[in-house]
Image: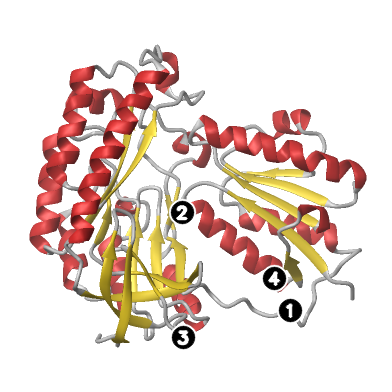
Amino acid sequence: MAERRYYLWNIGCQMNRADAQRLEEELARRGLVSTRQPERADVLVLNTCVVRQSAEDKVVGRLASLSAIKRRHPERVLVVMGCFVADPAALATRFPYVDAFFRPSDVAGVMAYLDERAERDAPMDPCAPVLPAPVSDLVPISYGCNHHCTYCIVTIRRGPEISRPLDEIVADVTDRVARGAREVTLLGQNVDSYGRDLPGHPDLADVLQAIHGIEDLWRIRFLTSHPQDMTQRIIDVAAALPKVCPSWELPVQSGNDAVLRRMARGYTADHFRDLVARIRAADAASAINTDIIVGFPGETADQFADTLQLVEEMRFDVVHIAAYSVRPGTPAANWPDDVPPEEKERRRVAIEELQTRIAGEINAAALGTTVEVLVDGRQRGRWRGRTRTNRLVFFADVGAWMGRLAQVRITWAGPWSLIGEVVGEGCPTF
């Protein structure tokens, strides 16, 4: 049987990464081999994002680049999945060379379509191997979102929140650990509202407790959390379970209450401050990461100054910064985009420079200390891994460290990564 290849292009959030991994697993089960060269692929899959205009532009550009392949080889299959797919019929008219369009996370739909196409020409290879899981794997526990933030297209494209049954999540994590995963990140567009649509209303704390006992699972993470929905029960359970890493993704978006109201975030800056304080009181080692949007419609210089002050005060470990861009179909798209582009950029740079200083100070405190690193790959001749607080660490060593825990003494610290030397091997103590 001739070797068949697939090309998978993926951009966007962690949920998209998880969907892409599931697609790769399913394609491998059918005997297809990955290629980075689209012109060599029998099957081409694009998993898309449109959270910002720049992401949507990348999707359109990639589609244009693949149109030549389809013209030369019409028998090859090109499918598009993800948040770009709002109106499949309209997209089919706009991009007639695409064979099929699928909604976000519809991995089953993509594979059913590919199976139907392949039935007569390229049946599934019964000897195809099962892919090993990544050392750090992604496990969705819910899809969609019930919030309606005025700038966000996620609810429009992904729909309302749907939680996976708890036993299904446990089985999924167990399978991934059996295939080599040592860390899992539980994913949801709003992970801390998990379970409200299920019988008995289990919550994220129940998921953490349910998977904590899985043998050979060493670390558990979860993202992304909505500050309005985080409960004290989740905070306390996360702090009490040793496998749960003290690393929190809490998008604040703005430090000004008027802007937060216009964003329909459902909390105040002081509520966010109190939430961070309670997390750090439960576990002083907790790292807090956040997202911030600058230049939201109507944001004044004084309102932006409140955000700058919040960043200074909270001392986040990581800040993901985005300049506001209009997303058609959202409420904010009907408002004047009245912060000039150059001012958006000035505000973005101001946050970036402040956070670079703060992150540098936080990481500098690690110099001379020894940290536990779960090694998940190599980069530029060094081993690469992360601490329990999700700090990126590199070290050089001749040993085979992939998938192992290393004790690393930090010898260099920058704002975005650490470098050290191995002083021993870590050992899970659960």
- Distance from the alpha carbon under mark 2 to that under mark 3: 32 Å
- Find disc 4 in the rendering and name its residue: 28
- Distance from the alpha carbon under mark 2 to that under mark 4: 21 Å
Q: Position of residue 423 (x, y in %)?
A: 28, 85
Residue mark closest to the camera, 3 vs 4:
3
Query: Considering only order in the chain, which callout, 1 or 3, is on the residue closer to the N terminus?
Result: 1
Q: Nearer the viewer, residue 316 or 253?
A: 316
- Distance from the alpha carbon under mark 4 to that under mark 1: 7 Å
Local SS, label 3: loop
Q: Which mark is residue 320?
A: none
Hey, what amino acid is under mark 1? Answer: Ala
Hey, what amino acid is under mark 3? Answer: Val
Local SS, label 2: helix
Hey, what amino acid is under mark 2? Answer: Gln
**Where, by quadrant of the figure, is residue 152 drawn?**
top left
- Find disc 3 in the rendering and name its residue: 398
Q: Nearer the viewer, residue 195 or 224?
A: 224
Query: Considering only order in the chain, which callout, 4 or 2, is on the residue closer to the N terminus?
Result: 2
Q: Which residue sits at x=62%, y=76%?
A: 131
